[in-house]
Image (cartoon, rainbow, N blue to C red):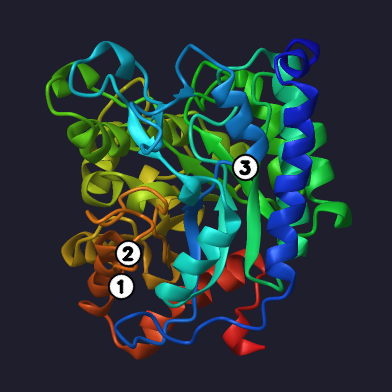
Amino acid sequence: MANLVRSIPRRTSNLLRSSVSSSTASLSSYTGPSSTDGRGYDHGAIDVHTHCYLPRYMEMLRNRTDVPYVCPGKSDADDERYVILPGEDAEDTTAIGRPIGEEYFDVGQKIRYMDRHGIDVSVLSLANPWLDFLPAEDAVAMAKLLNDDLQEISEGSNGRIYGFGVLPTQDPEASCKEIERLASEDCSKVKGVILGTSGAGNGLDDPALEQVYSALAENDMPVFLHPHYGVGNSHFDGTGHSLFLALGFPFETTVATSRLILSGAFDRHPKLRLLLAHSGGTLPFLAGRLDSCVEHDHEMCDKLERAPSSYLKEHFWYDSVIYHTPALKSVCDLVGSDKLMYGTDNPFFPPKEGARSDKEWPSTSKNYDAIDGMVGEDVRNDIVWGNASRLLGIEPIHQK
């Protein structure tokens, strides 16, 4: 961590402490959530897919010149720009990155967004690429600091904020120690961990992660699995971020999850539980084909105790960030509505008028509409808040 600490001036370190304290102070006076969103809907939602780049992480990005990094906008009036995705700086339509304003790192802005859209509770997670780009020693130290920041912010939120912690996956042994710490009472507001598909650098089926899966299962800690690297990226040139996010991300989740299942990890760790981003990629649609291809492959047919789709039903939960009723029906048809949870992917995909406008976020309302289009009120309540409450042990404010 020494090199990382030296790269951040003392004045900035003081600002980091004051930023976290300021966020906590602004939340401590909160008296309760708005009961409705801007359209008059009474949701009481628990948002399981919502991100925040904590102040400490932002300062690290501002001190970098390699991807990922944050750089100034073209003028003083512009937001900073964030270059985040692999190869983004080398492709003409993505080289300038994306605008990144306070909605990405200010928890007060997160709360205002929640109130605007009928969200009781947000389970914050550090957005990609987490700590994947750091040397192992720096990642170990930074993970602890960020998780402590998340716990402090959550403690001061009057029940509005919980978190998924981050792991230094480059060092599996240190990750196990951090899992044990996160499962302790000292980190009671951390309800699981977020994990990228690269694992320790060689994918989720890497034998080096066996001890991590064992620690997660033993400590009853769910994993929120999120993509970052994409699959099939050479096909997306010239399309900005659109196809990388629309196709590359869910394909990545599909491949990584399938490899994890085929590795036999769930036979060895039957208590392991994962929440899949973006409704599980294409797995709900392709589960039958996956079963058939494994069954008829001489290399794979005898390596699992049961068909791959049975693991998708037993060990996985799915967020609703797919914006489309038929897709959500596909998830429910495969695994049941009790495995589906509301998510927003905030602060990504803001309204065209900008994240700090008073406009409704279409990306958020579309997720509500997609759920409303397929289920009755009781099942809808389970998806919007009940299932997350049961999995993560979070009591929605409107139920207190």
Mark 3 surroundings within 10 Å by alpha-carbon count, few (fewer than 14), some (14 through 19), many (20 or more): many
* Numbered badge on residue 354: none
Residue denoted by label 3? 54
Which one is earlier in the sequence, the residue at label 1 or at label 3? Answer: 3
> Which corner quadrant holds the C terminus?
bottom right
Pointer 2 with pointer 1, Cβ within 8 A: yes
Q: Amino acid at mark 3?
A: Leu
Residue denoted by label 1? 368
* Up-down relation of residue 315 to residue 91 (above or below): below
Marks 2/3: CA–CA distance:
22 Å
Q: Nearer the viewer, residue 315 or 10?
A: 10
User: Residue lying furthest front in this view?
Assistant: 76
Quarter-of-image position of residue 200: top right
Horizontal and vertical percent position of residue 370:
23, 70
Q: Nearer the viewer, residue 79 or 113?
A: 79
Marks 2/1: CA–CA distance:
7 Å
* Circle nearer the viewer, 2 or 3: 3
- Whether residue 366 is visible, yes or no, is yes
Horizontal and vertical percent position of residue 135:
66, 12
Assign a secondary structure to mark 1: helix
Marks 1/3: CA–CA distance:
27 Å
Residue denoted by label 2? 364
Horizontal and vertical percent position of residue 102:
50, 48
Quarter-of-image position of residue 361: bottom left
Quarter-of-image position of residue 160: bottom right
Q: Amino acid at mark 1?
A: Tyr
